[in-house]
Amino acid sequence: MRLNILIGGEAGQGINKISEIVSTVMNYYGYYTFNYRDYPSLVRGGHNFNILCISDTKVASYESVLDGIVAMDELTIKLHKSQLKKDGFVIPVKGFENLGRNINVAQSGALLKVLGLGKQALIDEVNNQFHNEESNKAAELGYNSQENKYNLEELSNAISKITGNQGIAKGAINSGINMYLAYPMTPSTGVLHELGSSQEKHGHMVFQAENEIAVVNSALGASFAGAKTMIGTSGGGYDLMTEGLSLQGMSEIPLVVYLASRPGPATGVPTYTMQGDLDVALRSGHGEFPRVVIAPGDAIEAIEKTNEAFYLAEKFGTLAILLGDKHLAESEFSFSEQPNNPIKFKVRRKVPGEAIVKASSYEHDKYGNTTEDANIACENGIKRLEKYAKIKQECKNFEMIKIHGNPDSKNLIIGWGSTKGAILDAIDGLDYKFLQILYAKPLSDDIKEHIQNSDKVILVENNLTGQMGYLIREKTGISIKNRILKFDARPFTSDKLREEISKF
Amino acid sequence: MSWFKKEFGTKQPITWCPGCPNHMTLEAVKKALKKIVKGKIKQKDVVMATGIGCHPKIFDYLNIGGIYGLHGRVLPTCLGMKLGNPNLIVLGFAGDGDTYAEGMGHFIHAGRYNCDMTLFVSDNQSFSLTTGQPTPTTQQGYKSKVNPFGEFNQPLNPIKLALASGVSFVARVNARDIQHTAEILEKAIKHKGFSFIEIIQDCLIFNKDINNKDNLMYKIKDNDDKKKAEALADQWNYNTKEGKIPIGVIYKIEKPILSDEWPQLIKLKEKSIGWKGL
């Protein structure tokens, strides 16, 4: 059973609340949910929609054909009815017009009745959210307004849900983060909010600096002074930070960077998604220095990989970049499994207050003093190479790639990051092996063998040029000819991706 | 002098030009540090961030820790170190190009944040390490390889900007007056909040036309009157060798400081630890 329900309306009408209430109740009844958010860059008005996918088995994507529409305005119906299945349902505002702020609560109730599940969890959730009788009554009114269509039954799965951004924040907290610095930029801002509002609870500090250049330089200062530090941004802000990243390379002050990309170049399509920034994550910052680039594919991996990034940054005094995109950052994932136990680690290096410690942007001797000596420059370069070799060795302790689907299949799909969900759902039941790349740098040595052992190889990326494909060619010498690239600033839907895969 | 070398100096060969006022600033800083580092305050509790240019070479000549940072980024680096451990005494050494060209935005915000740290700007009205291009404080008419017609742009008055930005300690010193400079530096470091000191200095190689202003300089008493501070700031326009150049504490006010506002930092201060010590 899998249902795709579009919930649409103007910005500010409260469509996210419908997704939240309905998915919380569905999770309570043991159903998996995936919520995709689609919204333009404006504050009030316009047309926003979510697609809430509800499933009795694991799901991490949505489909292009709709089972139902919940419309908070007429425009939603007009724009999306062509996507609706013949027997699809529509829940309009009609009948709820006088409910004011509780229209969305009533529509949540209406949708849950269509799905056919009991009323009590709905009332509990609405009460939990709003603590007022009016909202409870609106939920009840909405619920009673519809007929049961799907007769869904309660399942025994224990399910929780979080967004990718919440996963990044959780991973940072699990790592004992002390300091998060950022300048607001979609789609990374969720982490700024998440960590900002949990400062009192978890004891870390969040500082919003005047720009991204200040963010990265202050972060290096804080980390140098002994704080476990992360910064977050999207492409434009990341570009501003890149000189600071190069300073990290020379000073070897630990730093974790969350790069939540969106379609560029420049301001691009700011509230939508794209995997266009792998290249800058891998190569930004002048000079040659080690780094780690990790791309989680869902919220659980965001928790785990953020922790690995913190660990690697501190252990090796390196730059650890967490590469995500809007589809990972703002989509809501549900799961029944628990993330791995976090790696616990302490700051062991000497910090100011304990000793006289010097870090430098110049090439420097072992005391931290500036040098232009050819031998020291050469030795330090070699040390940076050796450090990267050690990092690569250490990364082998972690899942640098994952194999999904049929591990013995001769048909191979390669993807990374937020395309994971759509690929998993697209190949469900097909004879495919899916190689998910989590570490873009260092890149796993095993990838070459997987490609060589396959008869058919397809590269799936949410970008224009197939950047991971070029990286694989650079590291293995193998050029992947079959490519499914999507660059309309929207994520893959699993049904359309399945059609694309079937063409090969 | 030899005692200071032992205490705060390093063995790194000094590469400033012979006779450069930077040598004198270095001695003044060592003198001030000698006053600051005593009792509970150890040498390892003082950190610096430096920019890139001539003056920031002081990083290699001072035996205190810190970050030899990027051009223009002294202030955010200092702020970060203070956030990382609010018990540290944080000093920033920058130049005029560093602070007013590349890093101007940070300067204004440092006034807003009023984080307890001190910025020293050595202003020789010239980009000297890159061989004499104009900076935002260069006088009009200055001819260089960049502009053979002479500099068109009006010089910035950093003292006025600091006052307008709400900086809580604004001072100016003459690099050549080591004793007076050391006294003001000590006051700036002890001031609770963001302190800004402009160090007027000559460049012996580039932009020599604006050199030798000692005869215009006069010492003032510490001032805490805003109107008077603005009048003092107006006495010299950076453009000519005319008018008077007041040196000393031009403005000083007690204001809430960043590290006393954030509960997380207050906790670290109470325990006398940085984040690492938690």
Image (tube, helix red, strand yellow):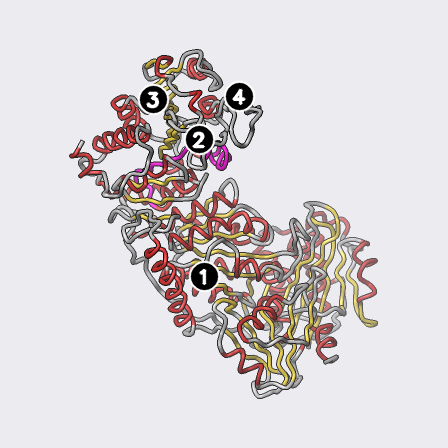
Instruction: Tell me, yes or no, whether the highlighted magenta stretch contains residue B101.
Output: yes
Q: Quadrant of residue B53?
A: top left
Residues under numbered marks 1 and 4 in contact, where contact means CB atoms less than 8 Å apart = no
Residues under numbered marks 3 and 1 in contact, where contact means CB atoms less than 8 Å apart = no
Closer to the camera in the image, A95 or A171: A171
Residue tagged 1: A291
Pointer 3 chain: B
Structural crowding at the residue carrying mark 2, measured as other residues with C-alpha within 10 Å and reported as few (<14), some (14–19) or many (≥20) = many
Task: Tell me which numbered mark, 3 or 4, is placed earlier along the sequence.
Answer: 4
Pointer 2 chain: B
Q: Mark 2: which amino acid? A: Asp
Which of discs 1 and 2 lies nearer the camera? The answer is 2
**Helix or strand or loop: what does disc 3 sit on?**
strand
Give the numbered dot on residue B140: 4
A351 w.r.t. A407: above or below:
above
- Label 3 and label 1: CA atoms lie apart by 45 Å
* Residue B72 percent coordinates (x, y): 46, 39
Give the numbered dot on residue B96: 2
Structural crowding at the residue carrying mark 1, measured as other residues with C-alpha within 10 Å and reported as few (<14), some (14–19) or many (≥20) = many
Give the numbered dot on residue A245: none
Residue B84 visible in this rendered orientation of the protein = yes
Q: Which residues are magenta?
A: B85-109
Residue tagged 3: B174
Q: Quadrant of residue A335?
A: bottom right
- Label 1 and label 4: CA atoms lie apart by 46 Å
- Residue shown at 55%/62% (left/top)? A162
* Residue A43 percent coordinates (x, y): 68, 45
Which of discs 3 and 4 lies nearer the camera? The answer is 4
- Residue shown at 51%/40% (left/top)? A210
- Label 4 and label 2: CA atoms lie apart by 16 Å
Closer to the camera in the image, A331 or A12: A331
